[in-house]
Amino acid sequence: MTNLDPRSMIALAGFMSAVMAMVLLFMRRHYPPSIRGVGGWAAAPLLWLLSTVLFGARGAIPDWLGLVLANQLLVLGSVTYYMGTRQFMGQPATWRTWNWVMAGTTVVFAWLTYGWPNYALRVGFFTVVMGALYAAQLRFMLRHGGHNFPVRLVEVMLGLHMLVLGVRLGSILAGHAGNDLMEPSLFQTLYIGAYALTVLMLSIGAVLMATDRLRTELEHLATYDSLTQALNRRALLQRCEDELERAQRYGSGPSIMMVDLDNFKAVNDTRGHQHGDAVLVHFAERTRQVLRRADRLGRYGGEEFLVLLPGADAQAALGVAQRIHATLATGHPRDCEVSIGLTSWSGPQETLDAMLSRADAALYRAKEEGRNRTVVWAEA
């Protein structure tokens, strides 16, 4: 293991950085803007690549390139990856503190290269800086990252590399720092190999996190109405079918409400479609506020909505309908009136088509009786 050439391992790390940078840049170009942080993730391996090029050319280029700038690019790449992670998870990319960190580390690296040349101190300082940076990112991800596999993968890699950095720092304190980065030794091989693996796995983790977010967004688009964020018709009808299957097993079923905004066509005609869209959004937001946690609101078509009330009998469902009427009559400029047709599960022979037909008939009766009311249809 100690015979492995450090320059070859650094070159391998640079090659992996180049490949992952290309992948992430392609993703940044083609993924939706709502998935933020991919730009930072793409820039990080580019900085790591440039750093490995400078490390590999050490001895053939000035020390301010091969030592000072190479180390700083490695630190900057890790900070950039961290900022990308913060943006991806919806937090601000706060560069102010890290700009001071970068300025301070530049001064220290320059001093330990030219003012007081000391390889062991320089490596020890770099190890502490990287460990602190990884610790900051790991702490942030544990607080904001969630529990999915891509996030856990990045957290594990950060933890493992912090362990390697701890071993490296221990070896430095024990007097085994060596004399040069290119010196073939067990500790150098362990560190450079861990660095190459970390570069690869952090980039893979970024790809997996972005891909998982894209899958989530596509599932959301396929399930929810883009305007009101209510379930779309297909998704809500599937929830209704699932609830009726559950009712067959447990003997108690749902109620459903067909809700229609009264005189909505007149709103569009007199105040414009943008105002009409705002009314629909307002209705959906207000209605969700009064629904129970298990209830589901879906857009059935146009200004017509469907509400699924699992486990609610007619009396409980009527109470929900009354709360909807009340919350829509609070004097807001976009308040509206609705007619509601309500029906409840009638027994094991029940079908969704039959319930929808009864709810629609009840809605029609509510409109005939003067609108802005709820009619309960209990007949089969």
Image (tube, helix red, strand yellow):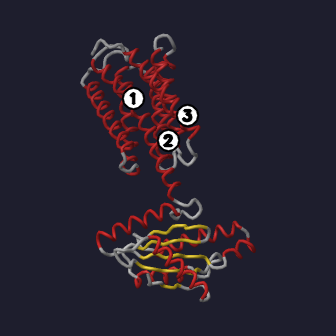
Type of amino acid under label 1? Phe
The numbered mark at residue 26 is: 3
Dot in front, 3 or 2: 3
Q: Which residue is mark 2?
A: 84
Q: Is 312 rendered above or below residue 84?
A: below
The alpha-carbon separation of the residues under discs 3 and 2 comes to 16 Å
Image x and y of residue 370, in percent: 62, 88
Sequence-earlier tag: 3 or 2: 3
User: Residue extending furthest bottom?
Assistant: 369
Sequence-earlier tag: 3 or 1: 3
Q: Nearer the viewer, residue 194 or 102?
A: 194
Quadrant position of residue 273: bottom right
Q: Nearer the viewer, residue 380 or 41?
A: 380
User: Residue extending furthest left?
Assistant: 174
User: Residue extending furthest right?
Assistant: 270
Dot in front, 3 or 1: 3
- Tell me the residue at 49%/34% (across/down): 102
Could you say whether the residue bearing mark 3 is in a helix, strand or loop?
A: helix
Quadrant position of residue 124: top left
Q: Which residue is mark 1?
A: 126
